[in-house]
Image: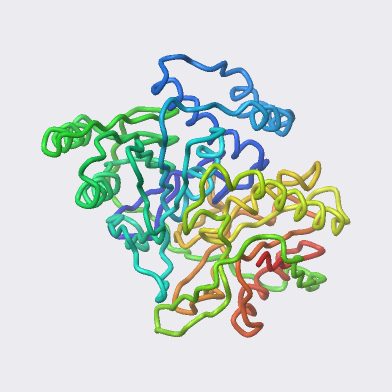
């Protein structure tokens, strides 16, 4: 756990498999999505798939890549159609990897904090404890037919976010009665679980929760920490910096976004992220594009120990690319979530760098725990093109981390 800079909730669970605040082997994080998918397949079909590859992938990092390849080759077919919704920003990759565990009959959408003026958000709900509370969904039809709805988050503490989105989904799609909620961690108390039962009775629906770890927790008091960021200082000579624009591999969505000051950012997004909705028929082509991007970037590698960085909501495609860039690659992501760092004892977050988002100067982004791992190089993957002036504060952090080479990759 770590202390969150947030008056609404003073703590944060820091996952060792999620690939957000701490570096992980990318295949380990991808396998965690398959672990949740296994729980869902067992619930849907009544048959428990063999868990050995998943256990191996989560507990044995040295063999995680091989376990993930085998899991990808033996995807499950669900007994009914499923609509997955991953929660931004932390669970965008987790939800996508869970969806990707199924061979057919599925669609995936992740919520977003982006404001896209050309489109109307079809779902709107609040994550009340979050640093950025508003969630939007830009798929024209988040749910179709008689799909069961699968909501994916990294952890549930009270479950309020889940209840908020279920209410909005039911308001728009009252014929859909079956909801599944999947999370790595479920810390709801008996009182919180009772609220789920009450909503089931109120709306005439079923809500089945799935988690790798379940328990109860409580917190009290405020953190006795004061530092909010780590001084970059002059750690070393600036790193060699290269801006890479990938070939035109991924399908783009030509819409713009508005930042918090109303400024328009016209660069296109990528459809393969799931922000606008994707379905099982899209996966084969997306896999090919990921492999091509990974081959292209792998040829740029010069060191034995490489960090790949996703940025904000843009987690899954960078994670998948990192998983195919060869041995010695670790992955994590930047985040909006502000955490107190401390170098004392065994505290989880010992280093925090802060900078204005390249896409919204009024939004602070954070990068945690990168300088103790002796990386030879770092590949930072951005979903969209950004202007040099907007990118500069982030570059100022990256080139003074003490890592020899920095590659900033414009994926779109």
Which residue is found at the position 55% from the left and 51% from the top?
21
Q: Is residue 239 above or below residue 57?
A: below
Rendering coords of residue 113 (x, y %):
41, 64
Can residue 20 be seen in this snapshot?
yes
Tell whether 116 sits left or right of 282: left
Residue 90 or residue 12, whichever sits in front: 90
The location of residue 356, given as percent across then percent down, is 52, 75
On the picture, is 370 further left or further right than 77? right
Instruction: Tell me where residue 55 sits by quadrant.
Output: top right
**Image quadrant in which the C terminus is located:** bottom right
Q: Identify the coloring.
A: rainbow
Count of marks overlaid on the render = 0
Residue 340, how many percent across, how many down? 46, 58
**The N terminus - image quarter:** top left
Q: Nearer the viewer, residue 167 or 106?
A: 106
Q: Residue 264: give x, y in percent of width and height.
A: 47, 83
Foreground pick, 48 / 193 = 48
**Residue 346 shows up from this direction:** no
Name the residue at 53% across, 51% down: 349
Does residue 247 sit above or below 356 in this rendering?
Answer: above
Q: Quadrant of residue 242?
A: bottom right
Residue 103 appears left or right of 105: right
Q: Quadrant of residue 176?
A: top left
Q: Name above or below for residue 402 compared with residue 266.
A: above
Left/right placement of residue 88 relative to residue 269 reads: left
Q: Residue furthest front?
A: 145
Residue positioned 54% across, 33% down in the render: 102
């Amino acid at each position: 756990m770590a202390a969150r800079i947030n008056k609404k909730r003073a703590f944060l669970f820091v996952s060792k498999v999620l690939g957000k605040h701490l570096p992980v082997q990318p295949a380990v994080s991808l396998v965690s999505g398959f672990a949740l998918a296994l729980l869902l397949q067992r619930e849907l079909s009544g048959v428990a798939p063999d868990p050995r590859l998943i256990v191996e992938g989560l507990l044995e990092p040295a063999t995680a890549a091989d376990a993930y390849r085998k899991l990808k080759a033996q995807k499950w077919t669900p007994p009914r159609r499923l609509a997955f919704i991953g929660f931004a920003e932390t669970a965008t990759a987790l939800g996508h990897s869970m969806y990707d565990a199924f061979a057919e009959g599925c669609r995936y959408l992740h919520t977003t904090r982006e404001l896209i003026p050309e489109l109307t958000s079809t779902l709107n709900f609040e994550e009340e404890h979050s640093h950025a509370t508003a969630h939007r969904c830009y798929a024209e039809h988040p749910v179709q037919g008689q799909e069961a709805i699968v909501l994916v988050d990294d952890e549930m503490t009270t479950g309020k976010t889940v209840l908020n989105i279920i209410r909005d989904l039911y308001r728009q799609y009252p014929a859909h009665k079956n909801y599944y909620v999947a999370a790595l961690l479920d810390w709801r108390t008996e009182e919180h679980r009772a609220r789920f039962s009450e909503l089931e009775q109120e709306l005439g629906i079923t809500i089945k929760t799935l988690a790798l770890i379940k328990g109860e927790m409580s917190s009290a008091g405020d953190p006795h920490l004061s530092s909010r960021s780590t001084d970059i200082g002059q750690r070393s000579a600036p790193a060699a910096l290269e801006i890479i624009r990938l070939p035109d591999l991924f399908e783009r969505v030509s819409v713009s976004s508005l930042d918090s000051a109303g400024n328009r950012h016209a660069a296109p997004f990528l459809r393969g992220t799931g922000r606008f909705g994707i379905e099982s028929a899209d996966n084969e082509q997306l896999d090919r594009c990921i492999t091509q991007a990974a081959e292209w970037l792998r040829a740029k590698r010069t060191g034995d120990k490489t960090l790949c960085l996703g940025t904000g909501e843009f987690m899954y495609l960078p994670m998948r690319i990192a998983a195919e860039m060869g041995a010695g690659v670790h992955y994590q992501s930047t985040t909006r979530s502000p955490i107190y760092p401390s170098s004392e004892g065994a505290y989880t977050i010992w280093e925090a760098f802060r900078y204005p988002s390249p896409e919204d100067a009024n939004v602070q982004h954070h990068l945690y725990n990168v300088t103790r791992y002796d990386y030879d190089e770092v590949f930072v993957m951005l979903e969209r093109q950004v202007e040099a002036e907007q990118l500069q504060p982030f570059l100022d952090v990256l080139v003074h981390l003490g890592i020899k080479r920095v590659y900033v990759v414009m994926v779109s």
